[in-house]
Amino acid sequence: MENFKYQTEQFADIRILRYKIPGFEELDLDKKKQLYYLYQAALWGRDIIYDQNYKHNIEIRKVLEHIFVYFKGNREKKEFKLFEIYLKRLWFSNGIHHHYSMDKFYPEFSKKYWHELVYKTDSWIFIHSDIDNLNIIEKKIGNIIFDKNIDTKRVNLDDGIDLVKSSSNNFYENVSQKEVEEFYAKMVDENDKYPPSYGLNSKLVKENGIIKEKVWKIGGMYSAQIEKMVYWLKKAKELSQSKLQKSAFEKLIEFYQTGDLRKFDEYSILWLQDNNSMVDAVHGFIENYGDPLGKKASYESVVSIRDEKASMRAETISKNAQWFEDNSSTDKKYKKEKVEGVSAKAINVVVEAGDCSPSTPIGINLPNAEWIREKYGSKSVSISNILEAYDLASKDSGTLQEFAFNEKEIELSKKWSNQASALHVDLHEIVGHGSGKLAPGTKDPSDTLKNYASTLEEARADLVALYFAIDPKLVELGLQDSIEVGYNEYNSYIKSGLMTQLVRVELGKNLEESHMRNRQIIAKWVYEKGQKDKVIERIKKDGKTYFVINDYKKLRTLFGDLLAEVQRIKSEGDYEAGKFLVENYGVKIDYELHKEVLERWKKLNIAPYAGFINPELNAVYKDDEIIDVTVSYPDNFAQQMLYYSSKFSFN
Ligand code: ZN
């Protein structure tokens, strides 16, 4: 695999990459089989994310895939290529809304060509659907994908409007934000110290005037997919490497069978305690970014093998978690007296599915339930092979040279960017999200900080990582080879927060996505507060803007000040202060600077987003027994998407 091709193609604003699975070949057969079962269980949930993102997504995907395969017209025409790009974008975003901005994206081929596509495609009989009339297909699907007035935003976080009604995700139907909030407020039992995450695994609908939940479980919504998942999870359970892992799988299966959220919490607690198994999987309804109210969770799965070497680094941080907690800049009354169960490791992923694919996180910190985190801690995972693939694919792209102020900055980055980003992820996940506590009587941040909760939580975790990035303790613990790693981290964070991340946003638009908002809040806040001392200087050279850090120590102090404030906001549930930070620092973009950044970026011709083709696992059978599992690395994105749609979907 010497010439392993990390990037296979680029279209629209997307690059398609691949990753390797180090260590797979060395596993014994049982572990390979277990991974194969979990791989199946993961991919069987793929259709769920399409449906959660938008209620017509699966139907649209099926129609477009059918055209892609059976179109009889000229496939070399420019318009057909534009159709291909539209379909690839849909696959990449698991639907017709951009995976990051949440805005609907539009075909670049014409409506006239759409007519040709539909009528020059045959074998429509293969599509089993409610719509079998070409005229209806053309009208119905055509309207949804072209119309710039309907369902234009998957998740709307704008202040002052009904977030539920203005978001076109498929978590609610016929209900208003007020009705949703009242429905779930009634469920809260003040005396329940261990409340389940109400609403996490259901769609809330109003039918005949009655508001009720449709639960995702066997016998409920997505029953067919969940039955398949459970079938494979049961097989994976039989090959468990420890009692703990076995009971975790048992609880997960029970959860899917019953839809009982308390079972999901029980599962999560067992899962987070199982930190040593070689094979591991995240599987379930996990992150709530797809819901503006943060109640409903999207399906995802990440199947992985432990990365022994990188896990040592994570363990060092984890072992010293109490030191980080005690020495952070937060108010003493919001510190945990005893940091417990911060378990950390690094993994190499084998397959990702649902919300985590093709676009993937680089680190995971779960579970999300606040009371579990406080009582049991959380499991923090950084994903080594994804981080490595990103780094190797981006080498020599020219971005660094364009946005770095001088040679020294470039040199620092070349030398340390790998170490700095891996360390940032670990600190963010292990001591960032895992730190701090709520003031007595303060409710869960999703109730107190509402639509600002996830942005502020990401800011808090980043600030912890930044605050310690140039602490000599990191070198002392062997986590950094040099304090320069931290300097490089500061350079790249400020650059990204104020400039380079803007390449992902259309000119004239606001920031929407939580992580982007959080980065700008931090960078803009420290820039502003340090202006008088020129901590960070805005310099214009040859018509280009640069942000140059003059004083790393003072910058650290500013990160610390903001960390203390964000922790206070979370601990006290101070909605107004949280809103102030987000609305003042995290939403609006400097128009002139944005324009400049986009122009500079355009010259480099690099798509701002990337996602991955998964490796394929193949079971080798003899009689009815699996005697081996092999890995292959496909390099055709469209083919993998078509394969998934044919293998892991129902008609
Ligand atoms: Zn995070």
Image: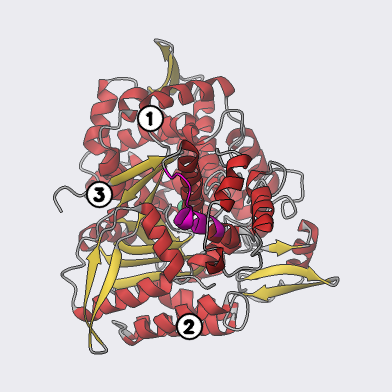
Residue 396, compared with residue 262, is above or below; it is above
Label 1 to label 2, Cα distance in Å? Answer: 46 Å
User: Residue sitting at 45 percent across and 45 percent down?
Assistant: 462
Q: Classify mark 2: residues with Cα within 10 Å, few (<14), some (14-19) or many (20+).
A: many
226 within the magenta span: no
The amino acid pointed to by label 2 is Ile
- For the C terminus, the quadrant is bottom right
Q: What x and y, as percent, mark residue 404? A: 34, 24
Judging from the image, what secondary structure is the residue with disc 1 in? loop
Range drawn in magenta: 63-75
Circle nearer the viewer, 3 or 2: 2
User: Residue sitting at 30 percent across and 78 percent down?
Assistant: 34
Residue 479, label in figure = 3
What residue is disc 1 on? 605
Single out the residue that lies furthest toward the bottom: 623
Circle nearer the viewer, 3 or 1: 1
What residue is disc 2 on? 253
- For the N terminus, the quadrant is bottom left
Q: What x and y, as percent, mark residue 88? A: 46, 49
Q: What x and y, as percent, mark residue 616? A: 30, 65
Q: What x and y, as percent, mark residue 9? A: 34, 43
Asked if labels 2 and 3 touch by Cβ distance under 8 angstroms, the answer is: no
Question: Predominant secondary structure in magenta?
Answer: helix
- Badge 3 or badge 2: first in the primary sequence: 2
The amino acid pointed to by label 3 is Leu
Q: Classify mark 1: residues with Cα within 10 Å, few (<14), some (14-19) or many (20+).
A: few
